[in-house]
Image (cartoon, rainbow, N blue to C red):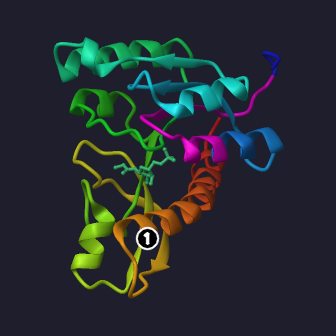
Amino acid sequence: MTNSDSRPTLAILISGRGSNMVAIARTCLSGALNARVTLVISNRPDAPGIEAAREMGIDTAVIDHKAFASRQAFDDALHERLMSVKPDWIVLAGFMRILTEDFVNRWQGRMLNIHPSLLPKYPGLDTHARAIAAGDRHAGASVHIVSPELDAGPVVAQVRVPIESDDTADTLAQRVLQEEHGLYIKALQLCVGKMDQ
Ligand code: GAR
C-alpha cells in the first residue's frame, strides 16, 4: 500500500478463530468496504486467526495478557501497540477480554464490538444457551459502539436468527455466526463511511 492511500484504517482485535476478522479483511481487499486492515492483534498466542491474518499479508501482533500483572498493564501495552499504527477504528472481533474504562475512554466512539445476542439481552457469556433456556423465539447478534460498561454501548446494527426447536447452543452459534460476518460489514459501512476526514 502506498502512503497516498487515504482509506480509513482498522485494527482488529481477536482472541481465537478470527472468522469475523477474515470476512472484514476480505471485504476490504475486494473494495466492497472502503477501509483497510493495518493490524490484527491477539491476546492469545495460539489464536488461529493470527495465522489467517498473516496469510492475508496483514501485520499481526500477539500481546499475551498472561504476561501482565494487571488488566491496566495489559491495556497500556495494547494501547501503545495500537498507537504505532494509529487506526481510525478498533474492531473487536471475538476479543474475549474486558477492557478498562481508561482504555475505552482513550478510543471513545472509535471502537466497535460484535456480541452474539440481541442486546440489551444477554450481555456477557453463554448467550445462546441463555436464549434457548429462556424459551426465546429469536437469537441474533449485535454490533455496538464500545462503552465502559460491558456490552452496553449504542447498538449500530443487529441481525435476528430464529431459534429452532432442536437447537443446541452450538447449532445456534453456528447459524448466528454465518450472519455475523455480513452484519459486521454492514455496521462498518455505516460507521466508517460516516467518518469526517
Ligand atoms: C463470535 O460469535 C462473536 O460474536 C463472539 O465470539 C465469536 C468470535 O468468532 N464474541 C463474543 O462473544 C464477545 N463477547 P470469530 O473469532 O470466528 O470471529
Is any part of residue 108 visible from this angle? yes
Residue found at x 47% / y 33%: 13
* Residue 88 seen in this snapshot: no
Q: Position of residue 142 (x, y in %)?
A: 43, 62
**x 45%, y 14%: residue:** 81
**Is 173 or 30 nearer to us in this picture?**
173
Residue for point 35% across, 67% down? 169
Q: Residue 15: where, in percent of width, then height?
A: 42, 34
At mark 1, the secondary structure is helix
Q: Nearer the viewer, residue 173 or 136?
A: 173
Please tell me in which quadrant of the rendered image residue 4 appears.
top right
State the residue position of label 1.
172
Percent x, y of residue 18: 53, 40
Point out the image quarter for the N terminus.
Answer: top right
Q: Looking at the image, is 163 positioned above or below residue 6?
A: below
Q: Amino acid at mark 1?
A: Leu
**Is residue 33 found inside the magenta-colored segment of the image?**
no
Residue 25 image-quadrant placement: top right
